[in-house]
Image (spheres, rainbow, N blue to C red):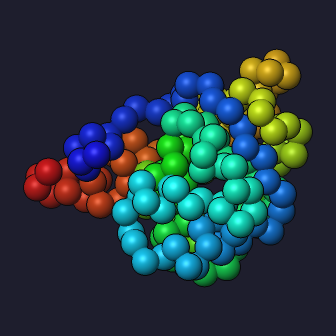
Amino acid sequence: MTEADTERDIDTTEPGRAWVFGSDIDTDQIIPSRFLVSSDPAELGEHAFNDLRPEFSEHVESGDFVVGGHNFGSGSSREHAPLSLLGAGVDGVVAQSFARIFYRNGINLGLPVLICPAADQIDDGDDISLRLDEGAVINHTADERYDADPLPEFLQTLVDKGGLKPYTKAKLGTE
């Protein structure tokens, strides 16, 4: 995938499967440190949640979502954690709260992240979609809508462009 391929308009995502995790999921649980020998998203995606949920990388499909509790993405500041989720095909992460560095790394890489206090009402396997502009998570399985913190316009623009690097290249006219 080239950076030009990453631009997208994702005010509303297509429904995808929810992969539910608990609270305090740290970056070593998202991508174990022994797999940090690469920065290739696809290669990292093959090892996402390897120790915590070994079946994840084999069964996750493009368009699925990760759902967490409180303090999702705590631990190190490395970008490999959100990069591995992108490489696995994850379309976004919904959590009750995020470690700030994971949140910003996700945005900077073009991974939609939404803070949703009701994320604990989403069950593993539910079909959900995100409405970034409205700040909502739609649970199609339960026929429910959960309020979330909408992404500010600038952060949504970064996600739409595929992250900070493609956004900056577009602004500089060096795409």
Q: Is residue 63 left or right of residue 173?
A: right
Q: Is residue 86 left or right of residue 141?
A: left
Q: Position of residue 161 (x, y in %)?
A: 34, 45
The residue that appears at 15% across and 57% down in the rendered structure is 172
Residue at the outermost right position: 121
The residue that appears at 51% across and 36% down in the rendered structure is 62
The residue that appears at 56% across and 79% down in the rendered structure is 34
Q: Position of residue 44 (x, y in %)?
A: 48, 62
Q: Is residue 2 left or right of residue 155?
A: left
> Where 137 sits versus 42, above or below?
above
Question: Is residue 80 at all visible to an observer of this figure?
Answer: yes
Between 65 and 60, the one lying in front of the other is: 60
Q: Position of residue 146 (x, y in %)?
A: 79, 34
Number of numbered discs: 0
Q: Position of residue 82 (x, y in %)?
A: 53, 61
Question: Is residue 158 at all visible to an observer of this figure?
Answer: no
The residue that appears at 25% across and 59% down in the rendered structure is 168
Residue at the outermost left position: 174
- Quarter holding residue 13: top right
